[in-house]
Image (tube, rainbow, N blue to C red):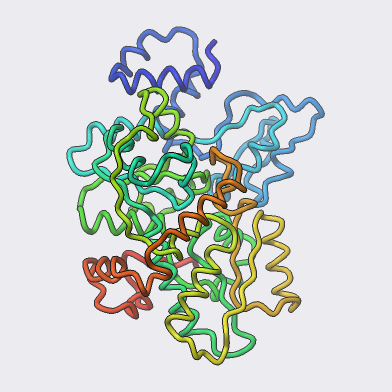
Amino acid sequence: MKTFEQLYHELLRATINDNTDEYIDKLDVYDTHQLDCLLHPKKHPVIWHIGDCECADGQHHCVEVCPFHARYPGESGEIKIDESKCAGCSYCIQECRAQKLTSSKDVIPALQAIRSHKNLSYALVAPAFLGQFSNEVTPGKLRNALKEIGFDGMIEVALFADILTLKEALEFDANIHTETDYQLTSCCCPVWIAMIKKIYHDLIPHVPPAVSPMIASGRAIKVLHPDSLTVFIGPCMAKKAEAKEKDIADAVDYVLTFQEIRDIFEVMEIDPAKMEESEKDHSSRAGRIYGHTGGVSEAVASTLERINPNREISIRTQQADGVPACKAMVNDLLSGNTKANFFEGMGCVGGCVGGPRAIIPRDKGRENVEAYGNSATFPTPIDNPYVIELLHRLGLDTVESLLENSDIFTRSLT
């Protein structure tokens, strides 16, 4: 019987060669569950079982390590997953000693959709992309490499991180007036938001009603280009779970990881480093540095300084990365052991650059993100004319309109 990886890579190659059905017809011995997962990933949780549990020591490490208690033993001893609780953090995959867990791979139906879609298809690329496909791959070269796959265009999600930075800064300016007021950032990490919703639900009033940059970019594209196909690309497994959440499932059609895109490049023999340049500089430093720990805090603080430099109550930020550190930070907040009033949490150590499907080490990823941020023409979103232009195109006449409920940038976490 073929291993899961063999089945995946052979099916990917068949899909790229437009003979998926022929390949499946010729399959003789294979796991029907694995094949169904690859062909129809939206039917399944974001964490897949690719074999029976074989924990040599009898301990269910995947159950013990899950911060959201989404994994549990069934009546016959098999490990089950409660999809409503799973945030896609991938801790269980890392702790599976038998290596019988893997993350959702959406690349087969995503490729089929890109090739069959009659309208525009857009790749929405996370700010952590710099250096993931080699240091020679500029944003412009990556844009052309993605067009070789079949996308009509590439959107840097950093531009929408700019908009959400502006929204968070405005929320802070509007709501933080005393020394005891505080705000939990809502923008970036679905694991952080899941932790607040599932473990610290009473803190939700301190979370501004904002979507993530991924959701904002997908919704905005669908407003500007109705019936377009949107595919988010990043280092994060949790984004696959986020895209399925009922109140925001209208934004992103598929989520692919950097590793899945690299697999496509390899099979199609596309070398992004050899692509022609197609540079388009739209995002500010603030939006570009979202990819590492502390980036959101710095972005909001610098933007708040531009909006209201004479605030009586200044912003005092605190950051944590990794679920244990995030829990410790929140517990410090609840016990009064902190002087911060703006709290940023990231589910992965290092932030997005430390995501489970990043290709390069997180320290190198952070270095690349910082360098890209430093090369930005504009320091903050309030200085960025592309932000203002985009807001106008989306029907927002002023930046202050971001404080109002909108179908693009807001959601309810209750």
Give coordinates of residue 275: x percent, y percent: 32, 35
Q: Is residue 357 above or below residue 224?
A: above
Indicate the quadrant where residue 387 lies.
bottom left
Give coordinates of residue 277: x percent, y percent: 30, 42
Indicate the quadrant where residue 110 lies.
top left
Q: Is residue 95 above or below residue 177?
A: above
Q: Is residue 12 above or below residue 147?
A: above
289 left or right, relative to 203: left
Please state which of residues 66 and 149 is positioned toward the viewer in this rendering.
Answer: 149
Q: Is residue 163 above or below residue 104?
A: below
Please state, as top left, top right, bottom left or bottom right, where the N terminus lies in the image. top right
* Residue at screen point 33% across, 57% down: 281
Please state which of residues 60 and 141 is positioned toward the viewer in this rendering.
Answer: 141
Q: Say whether residue 247 is visible.
A: no
Give coordinates of residue 153: x percent, y percent: 26, 45
Q: Say whether residue 384 is visible.
A: yes
* Residue at screen point 55% across, 61% down: 193
Please state which of residues 287 and 194 is positioned toward the viewer in this rendering.
Answer: 287
Give coordinates of residue 130: x percent, y percent: 46, 47
317 left or right, relative to 156: right
* Residue at screen point 54% across, 63% down: 295
